[in-house]
């Protein structure tokens, strides 16, 4: 059973890669998309989702995974406004199901999404990757860090770290002041109890993305970091609709996480509708940089990760997640065409080899 190979696309306005190029990557059938101009917390209108789907379909691709429908900070903090916001989220789920979406990827990181300290770190062969230097990240305020990242990265800012957002940061941090890990967990459970029944009704699966990096930063709690966290989360609402995006890179950034074992544990229990398959290289003291997808290029064993998927009958969606910037490509850091396409070619080969090997050894 091969996965449905997918490719993240930021939309005609914001992504330099045309859908017709995505269609030419071997085995890619599905686009991981989103509406990027709807403020967090508002309902995604059916007409806009339909328009996106029509574009994707016209290129010969499907739109079955959304990444992300972001969760409003009021829900993470547990403010009274959360009920209205969860209600909006439920409506968005219904609207997405109405156009055939099957999986919604989301995260539950307070304030920020993923974090790196350099978006164009140069590897010896001359490619550029995203890098995280723990000493830099932990010694600066978020405002300082955002300036450092922009200065290190040729003017690029991290998504979710835009100037206007940083302006409101003090207020947001103050609102999180009373929220520790247990408080955040209770608020995640409340959110899941609110949305999972609707998902079950309409046939959508919520796929929670791990924290990236999987550790607490700026004194904010993080609760999606490792096997125990993920077990706790999947046990709170016991439904296949309360599922995970297992992101090998994010979990793998912590050398203590056994990524193939985590993959196997949840895939076996049918909690993995979506995977992000990428590699990273640990550089010591909690730091790392991203790498090409091959096992030999980084610290993760991609063969063992794919084997865990094949042996548990994984039939969900996969995307290569980030790639290096190579061949002078200019584009969004981590989201170029060439290296993600190379990553897919490699992953296709791993899946075929492991599947055929398993079939062969099952023959008498
Ligand atoms: C980074 C992505 C994340 C991811 C969100 C999911 O490249 O993996 O931004 O989309 O955390 O909500």
Image (cartoon, helix red, strand yellow):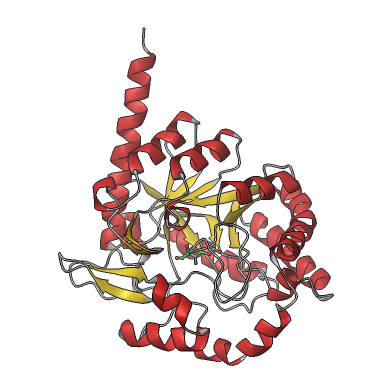
Looking at the image, how many numbered discs can be counted on the residues?
A: 0
- Left or right: 71 in relation to 197: left
Instruction: Return the residue nearer the eye: 154 or 179.
Output: 179
Residue 189 seen in the figure: yes
Quadrant in which the C terminus is drawn = top left
Residue 172 lies in quadrant: bottom right
- x then y, percent, for residue 295: 29, 46
Quadrant in which the N terminus is drawn = top left
- x then y, percent, for residue 14: 42, 77
- x then y, percent, for residue 139: 46, 80
Residue at the location (55% across, 51% down)?
Answer: 226
Residue at the location (45% across, 70% down)?
Answer: 10
- x then y, percent, for residue 33: 50, 63
Residue 357 lies in quadrant: top left
- Left or right: 254 in relation to 65: left
Instruction: Return the residue nearer the eye: 48 or 320.
Output: 320
Q: Is residue 169 above or below residue 223?
A: below
Residue 1 seen in the figure: no
- Left or right: 130 in relation to 1: left
- Left or right: 215 in relation to 289: right
Residue at the location (60% across, 55% down)?
Answer: 208
Specify the farthest residue to the left. Answer: 125
């Amino acid at each position: 059973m091969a996965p449905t190979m997918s490719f993240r696309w930021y939309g005609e306005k914001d992504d330099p890669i045309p859908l017709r190029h995505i269609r030419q990557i071997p085995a890619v059938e599905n686009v991981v998309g989103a509406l990027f101009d709807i403020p967090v917390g508002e309902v995604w209108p059916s007409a806009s989702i339909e328009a996106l789907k029509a574009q994707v379909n016209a290129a010969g691709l499907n739109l079955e995974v959304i990444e992300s429908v972001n969760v409003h900070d009021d829900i993470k903090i547990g403010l009274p406004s959360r009920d209205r916001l969860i209600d909006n989220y439920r409506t968005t789920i219904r609207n997405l199901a109405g156009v055939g979406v099957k999986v919604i990827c989301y995260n539950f990181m307070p304030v920020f999404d993923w974090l790196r300290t350099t978006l164009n770190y140069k590897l010896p062969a001359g490619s550029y990757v995203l890098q995280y230097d723990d000493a830099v990240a932990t010694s600066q305020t978020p405002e300082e860090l955002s300036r450092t990242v922009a200065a290190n990265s040729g003017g690029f800012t991290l998504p979710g770290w835009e100037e206007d957002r940083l302006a409101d940061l003090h207020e947001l941090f103050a609102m999180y002041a009373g929220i520790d890990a247990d408080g955040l967990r209770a608020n995640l459970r409340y959110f899941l109890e609110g949305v999972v029944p609707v998902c079950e009704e309409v046939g959508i699966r919520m796929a929670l993305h791990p924290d990236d990096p999987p550790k607490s930063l700026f004194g904010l709690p993080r609760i999606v970091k490792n096997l125990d966290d993920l077990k706790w989360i999947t046990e709170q609402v016991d439904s296949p609709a309360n599922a995970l995006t297992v992101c090998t890179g994010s979990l793998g950034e912590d050398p203590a996480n056994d990524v193939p074992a985590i993959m196997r544990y949840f895939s076996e229990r049918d909690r993995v509708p979506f995977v992000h398959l990428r590699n990273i290289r640990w550089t010591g003291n909690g730091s790392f940089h991203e790498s090409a997808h091959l096992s030999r290029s980084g610290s993760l064993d991609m063969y063992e990760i794919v084997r865990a998927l094949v042996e548990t009958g994984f039939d969900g969606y996969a995307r290569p997640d980030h790639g290096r910037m190579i061949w002078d490509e200019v584009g969004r850091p981590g989201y170029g065409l060439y290296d993600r396409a190379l990553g897919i070619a490699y992953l296709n080969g791993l899946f075929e080899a492991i599947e055929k090997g398993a079939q062969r050894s099952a023959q008498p």
